[in-house]
Image (spheres, coloured by chain):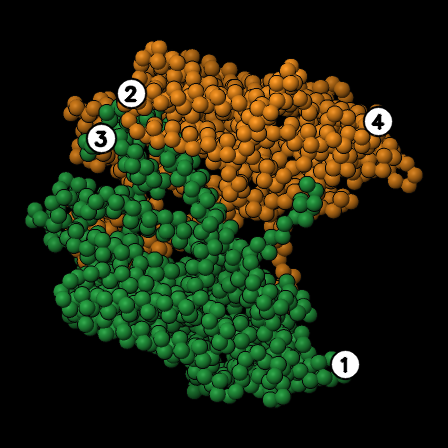
Chain colours: A green, B orange
Amino acid sequence: ERWDSGTNLLLAAAYVSDAQYNRNIPFETSPQAIRLYYFYNHWTMQVAIYFFICVDLSLALFEEPALFPLPFLATSLAEVLCLMAFFGRLVHFAKVTPQMVFWKDTKNICIMVTIVLTLIDLIICGSLEAVNIHSVRWSRALRPVFLINFPESRQIRRTFRSIRNTLPDILYVFLLFMFSVLIFSLMALKLFGDRGLKTVEGLPYFTNILDIVFELYVLVTTANSPDVMMPAYNFNWWYSLYFITYIIINTYIFMSVFLAVVYNNYRKHLKNEIRKLAYLKRHKMIEAFNILKVQVGTEFVVMEAQWRRLAKVVAPHISSPHLELLLRISDEGQKGHVDKVNFLRLPDLLNIQVVTINVKRHPLEDWMPRVYQSSASLLVQRIVRHRIFVWVYDVIILINAIFIALDEKNPFISHAEWLFLSLYIIEILLKLYTYEPRAYFGRKQFWNWFDMLIIMAALVATLANTTIQSGQCHCFTLQLPLCRLVPEALLYPRFRVIVTTLINIGPTILTFGGLVLVVYYVFAIIGMEAFRGKVRFSDPNFTSPDALVCGNPALKDSAFARDRYCKNNFNDLASSFIVLMELTVVNQCLLLLAGGFALVTHQAAKLYFIGFHIVVVILIVNIFIAFILEAFFVAYSLEKSEVETAIEKKIQELGVGIQEEEMQDGKLIDNVDAKDSGFSGDDGDNKRKDLKGLYFRIASKKYRTVDALLQQMFESEIAPEEEGPSLDEILNFSPGDMYPKNPNFENSA
Amino acid sequence: ERWDSGTNLLLAAAYVSDAQYNRNIPFETSPQAIRLYYFYNHWTMQVAIYFFICVDLSLALFEEPALFPLPFLATSLAEVLCLMAFFGRLVHFAKVTPQMVFWKDTKNICIMVTIVLTLIDLIICGSLEAVNIHSVRWSRALRPVFLINFPESRQIRRTFRSIRNTLPDILYVFLLFMFSVLIFSLMALKLFGDRGLKTVEGLPYFTNILDIVFELYVLVTTANSPDVMMPAYNFNWWYSLYFITYIIINTYIFMSVFLAVVYNNYRKHLKNEIRKLAYLKRHKMIEAFNILKVQVGTEFVVMEAQWRRLAKVVAPHISSPHLELLLRISDEGQKGHVDKVNFLRLPDLLNIQVVTINVKRHPLEDWMPRVYQSSASLLVQRIVRHRIFVWVYDVIILINAIFIALDEKNPFISHAEWLFLSLYIIEILLKLYTYEPRAYFGRKQFWNWFDMLIIMAALVATLANTTIQSGQCHCFTLQLPLCRLVPEALLYPRFRVIVTTLINIGPTILTFGGLVLVVYYVFAIIGMEAFRGKVRFSDPNFTSPDALVCGNPALKDSAFARDRYCKNNFNDLASSFIVLMELTVVNQCLLLLAGGFALVTHQAAKLYFIGFHIVVVILIVNIFIAFILEAFFVAYSLEKSEVETAIEKKIQELGVGIQEEEMQDGKLIDNVDAKDSGFSGDDGDNKRKDLKGLYFRIASKKYRTVDALLQQMFESEIAPEEEGPSLDEILNFSPGDMYPKNPNFENSA
C-alpha cells in the first residue's frame, strides 16, 4: 500500500505548496532532492538491488562445495561487484535521508559492517588460496544480512524484530523446559540404566546421561516415539507410565506454552508496530495539511485546486472521473475546499480500489444485432448463464478425474481425452458468445484467464503428444483440466472465509519464505562447512557396496544407510536445503540424520540438529502458526471500514454504482455487463452529468493483507480530530504501553 | 466455585425468608424439598455416583479380552448394579427438578436410552452366551455416556458441546483438505506411477491410488517423512519439489487452519457459555434480593440480620471475623442494611479467599525467652532468613544432582548420600527453630510440607535400603532430594506467569483427561473387538521364532515385527490405551501400526487408524492447544477484580492487613510472623476493636481457573444496576449474538 506511510503525501504537499511554507518541513524539499528521492524509490532501482541480492545469495551454488563449480576468482569478483552495488545503494539512501536519521538506523550500520567483514574474509581467503591453503569462508553465512537489512524487506525485518523481542520470554520457558528434561533424564538413568536393556539395534539402552538427554529431547519432537519406549515397555508394562507422563508434560504442555508465548508476543509486537505506523501516518498527514492550509472564515482548509494538484502528484495514473469522485467525497458541501478531517482521510481514499466500469455491448450485437437478439440465441445465452450449466461442467470434470485415475493404457480412455477437451473448448466458446469478451477477460477476471490458459495448454500438449507419440508428457496434459475444479472448490460459499483468508495471507507467507530462506541459508552454509563430503550418494539403485554405506564405512549397518538416506547430505546448497526442509517437518528423520552424521563426524554434530530444531520448529514454525491464527481471527472479525462505507454511500448517492449481491460477491463476476444493462434505464439522472457513461464499484475486500486490516482497525479507533503523540513518543512506543497495569493494584498494597 | 451459579444463594434466600415471599419463587421450597436438594448435592452421593461410573468403566478390564478374566455372569451382575445406581440417581434428580426442565434436558434422555440399550444388549448376549455363541458386546462402547451425562461432569460436557459446535466449520475445512489431498494423489499417480520405483522394502512405489491417498494422508501427520519421498528423490532431484509443495500446503497451512478454526470456535463458545453463566447468576441474585428485600425510605434493601442469616446458611464454616469483614464491605455506611448493588456482590465476596492470620510467638520464645533472644540465636535466625541461606542449599542440591548422575557404585559417592541427607535435616531443623512451627506448616504452606515429606521419605528409604541391602529401591531414594529443586524453579520470579498459568489450568487439564478417557475408551472397545488376539507378545527377549513375528506369520519381515512392536496390541484394555496414546503422539508409529494391523486383518483396518487420527489429533489435541493458548492470554491480561480491590481497600482501612510485597507474593511465605511483628506496633487503632488479634490477607490469585477469570472479566462488564435479559433469553443465547454484523454493511449495498 503505497500511501500507508503518508511519506509520499507529505513530500508531494511540500512539492505543490509555495516556497514560503518550506521552513516548516523537517527535510530538504528542493526539486532535486525530491527527484533523487523518487529515483531512489523507482522500481528499476529496487529490481536492481533485488537482483544483486539474488546473485550474492546464489553464489553459494557455485562455490565449493558447489552444485555448478566455478573458480574462486569468478565468484569473488561477482561478490565484490554485489558489495559495490550494496554500497552504492547505501550512499544513495544516505543522500535522501537526514544525516541524523541515517546514522541512528542500525540497519545501515549492519550493512556497512557486513560489507567490511566480507571484504576482509575475501582478502584473507584469496591470499590463502593463492598459496593453496583452503580456509573456511565464514563470511558467507553473513550474506542474508543484505536481504534482511535493505529497506525494501520491511516485512522480513519486522518478523525478525518480532522474533528478537520474543526471545527473552521464550528463553525462560526454554530453561524451565530443559530443567524438566534434565530431571526426567536423571530419573530415566536411575530407572533403566541398570536393567541391562537393549534397543532394537542391540545397543545399550539409557545408560549414558548425555544420550538420554538427547533421546528425550528428540522425544519432545515425537520423532522417536514409540521406539524409545519399546525396550522399557517390553520389559515391564508400568514403565510406559514414565513415558506417558513425560510426553504429556514436555510434548503437549510445554510445546503449547511455547506456542502461547510466541503468539502472545507476536500479537503484542504486531499491534505495537501497527499503532506506530498509524500514528506516524497521522503525524505526516497533519504536517502535510499544515503546509497546504489556508484560512477560510474561522477554519483552516485546503483549497480544491491545491488538493487536485496534490492528488495528481501522488497518484499520477488516477483517472479523472475517479479523482472527481474522491473530491466529491472529500468536499461534501461542494464548497470549493477540503477541511482537515477530510484531508486526513486522503491516503485511505487513494487506497481504496475503485473499479471503473465501462458498459459495453457485445461486439456480435453491434455486428449482427438481428441474429444475436434472436430467440434461439437468447435461449443459448440464458442456458450459459444458468447455474445448471456450471454444474453440468463440474460433473464432466469429475468424470474426467475418474477416467484419469483409471488406467490410461486402455484405448477407449485415451480417446475419451479428446472428447473432454472438445467439451471444454465448446464451453469457452459458448461463454465468449454470451459474455462481452473484453469484460470476460478483464484485468480482474483472474479465474477466466486461468480456465482459458489451462484448456489451451491441455490442447497444445495433447496435440504435441499425439504427433510426437512420446508418453513422457502425457501424464501432465491429462491432469490439467482437473485444475479447473480448483476455483470451483475455492469459491464455494461455505469456504469463503477460509479461502479469502488464505489468499489474504499469501503475500505474507512469502515473507515467511524470506525468513525461512535466511535461516536455511545460514544453517546450510554451516552444514556444508561441517559435513560436506562425509556422505555420498552415487548409485540410485544401491547395487554397489559403496553406495549401500553412502560412501562412508562408518555408516555400515546404521539405520541411516539402511533406509537409503544417502541423498540427504550437505554436499551442495540444494541438497542442504532439502535436508533442512526435512528437518523442519521433524519426524524420525531428525533422529536418523543426527545419528548418521554423528557417526561420520563426531557426537557434537547432534548439537547442530538440535540447534536447528530450536530455531526453526520452536521459533519460526510457531510464529508461522501464530501468524495464521491471527490472520483468521482478523478475518472472522472483519468489517467494512468507515471510509469505504463513505465512498460506497457517495457512489450510490451519485447513482453510478453497481448493485453488488451478497451471493455474487465472491463468485466469478462474469455477468457484469448483464447487470449493467439493468442500470442503463435511468439515464436521466442529472447528478451523473460529470461522470456519464462510467460506473464504479468498490473492489471486493478479498485481496487485502492482514497488516492493512489491522492498521485500518486501529486507525478507526483514533478520533478524527486527534493529533496523536509527538514524533519522538511515536518512535519510542513499546509493547508494554499497550497493556496498562491496573492502577488500583499498586495503590492497594 | 460453589457460589458461582447463584443457585445456592437463591435457595438459601428462600429458606431464610418468611413464607409470605414464597409465591415469587419459581420452584418448590418446602423444607423437605430443600433437604432433598441438599441431599442430592451431598458429597457422599456424588462420591457414590463416581464410584459406580468407575466400576462400570473398569468392567472392560474383566470382560473378554480381559486383563483379569472374570466369568460373564459376574461382570453382567456388576453392570446391572451400576445401571440401577444410575437409574436411582436419575430418579432422585427428577424429584428435585421441575418436571418440564427435567424432560427437556437431553442428558437425562441420553442416560435413559443408554440404560435401556445396555440392558437389551446384556439380555441378548446373556442368552447367546447360554447356548455358547459369542457375540459382540457393542453396548460397552456406550459406557462413557454415563460419565459425560451426569450433571457433575459439567466441564467434560462443555468441551463436548464445544466440539459438536465446531464440527460444521471443521467439516468444511476438512473437505477442502481432502480435495487437496486427492488432487495431489492423482498427480502423484501420474508422476511416479509409471516409473517403476521401489520403496526401501522393495514394494512398488505409488502405483495404487488408494495407497497413495493413505500415504499422503499420513504425510500430513509427518509420520512417513522423508521415507515416502526418498525413492522419488533418489530417482530425481526435482521430485522433491512436489513433496515440499505438498507439505507446505497440507501439513503447515491446513493444519494451522484447523487449529485456527477450532480455536476460534472454542473461544466463541466459551465466551457464550461464560456470558450465559454470568447472566444466570445475576438473574438468580436479583430473585434472591427480591425475596429478602424490605423498603427503607425510598429504596429496597436487605436488613443486616437477614443478611447474616443468609451468609450463615450458604457458608456455614465462615469465621465470624471474616463475616464481620464482609458485612463492613457490603454495608459501607454502617446503616444496618445492605443495598441492592452490594447484595448482588455477595457471591463474589464469598468467593474471595481471605486468609485469617493469627500472630503467634515462637514456642521457644515462650519457653526460654532468654536463650531464644540471645545474640547468637538471633544471628542464627537472621542467617536462616537470609537469601544466601536458600542459595547455599540450592548449590548443595545441584552438587547432589551431579553425584547422582555419576556412578553410584563408587563407595565414596554412596557415602556422600548420607552427608547430603544430614545437611537437609539440619536445614529443616534450622527453619523450625527460626519460624513459628504452626505457621511454617500452615494449611496453605504446601511447599514446606513438600520439602519435609521428601526429606522424611528419603531418610526412611535410605535407612531401609542400608538395612535390607537390596539395590532395588536405591535409585529412587537418591533422587528424592532433587525434587526439592522443583519449587525453587517454579517460584523463580521470571517464571511466575508461566507457572501460575500452568497451575491454574491444572484442574481443567483433568477435564481433558476425562475427555480423552471417553474417546480412548470408545476406540479401545472397538479396537479390542476388531483386533484382539491378532498380534501376541510372549517373549520379552524375542528369542523364539514365534515371538519374532508377534505370533502371527502374516507379520513376517514386516517393519512392525522388525521394530519389535508386538506389545502394541489390542489384547486388553491397558494395552489398547497405550497403543492409542502412541497414536496420539502420531509419528511413524501410525504408519507401522496401521501397516501391521492391516497385514493381520485387512486393509480396511487403516480406516480405524485414520479415524482415530482425525478425532484425536485434529479435534482434541487442537482443542487442548486452544485451551492452553486461551489460558495464557487470560493470564497475560490478568487484572485484580474490582471486588477484590474493594475488599483489600477495606482491609487496609480497618488496619488489619498484611503488607504484601510484590517480590514476596509468589515466594514461600515462610516469614509471615516476622512481618506481622512489624504491624503489632500500632495496636492502639480503635477501628480494629471488633477484629482484634486477627490479620487478613487476600489469598494470592494463583489458584484460580480460567473460567472463573473469564467470568469475572465478563461480569465486570455488566453494569451493577443492569437487570440483564429474561431467563428465556439467557438460556437461548447463541455465539452468533456475540459478533453483531456491521449494520452499515447491509445498508450500503
Residue under label 1: A298
Q: Are marks 4 and 1 in contact (CB under 8 Å)?
A: no
Residue under label 2: B411
> Which is more N-terminal, label 4 or label 2?
4
Residue drawn at (7%, 49%) of the image: A544
Marks 2 and 4 share the same chain: yes
Residue under label 4: B305
Q: Quadrant of the C terminus of chain B?
A: bottom right
Foreground disc of the pair 2, 4 = 2
Name the secondary structure under disc 1. Answer: loop
Q: CA distance from mark 3 to mark 4?
A: 75 Å
Q: Amino acid at mark 3?
A: Pro
Q: Position of residue B585 (x, y in %)?
A: 36, 38
Foreground disc of the pair 2, 1 = 2
Foreground disc of the pair 3, 1 = 3
* Mark 4 neighbour density, 10 Å: few (under 14) some (14–19) many (20 or more): few
Q: Are marks 3 and 4 in contact (CB under 8 Å)?
A: no
* Mark 2 neighbour density, 10 Å: few (under 14) some (14–19) many (20 or more): few
Q: Amino acid at mark 1?
A: Thr
Q: CA distance from mark 2 to mark 4?
A: 73 Å
A238 left or right, relative to A592: right
Residue drawn at (63%, 75%) of the image: A286
Foreground disc of the pair 4, 1 = 1
Q: Position of residue B268 (x, y in %)?
A: 57, 47
Q: Amino acid at mark 4?
A: Ala
Name the secondary structure under disc 2. Answer: helix
* Mark 1 neighbour density, 10 Å: few (under 14) some (14–19) many (20 or more): few
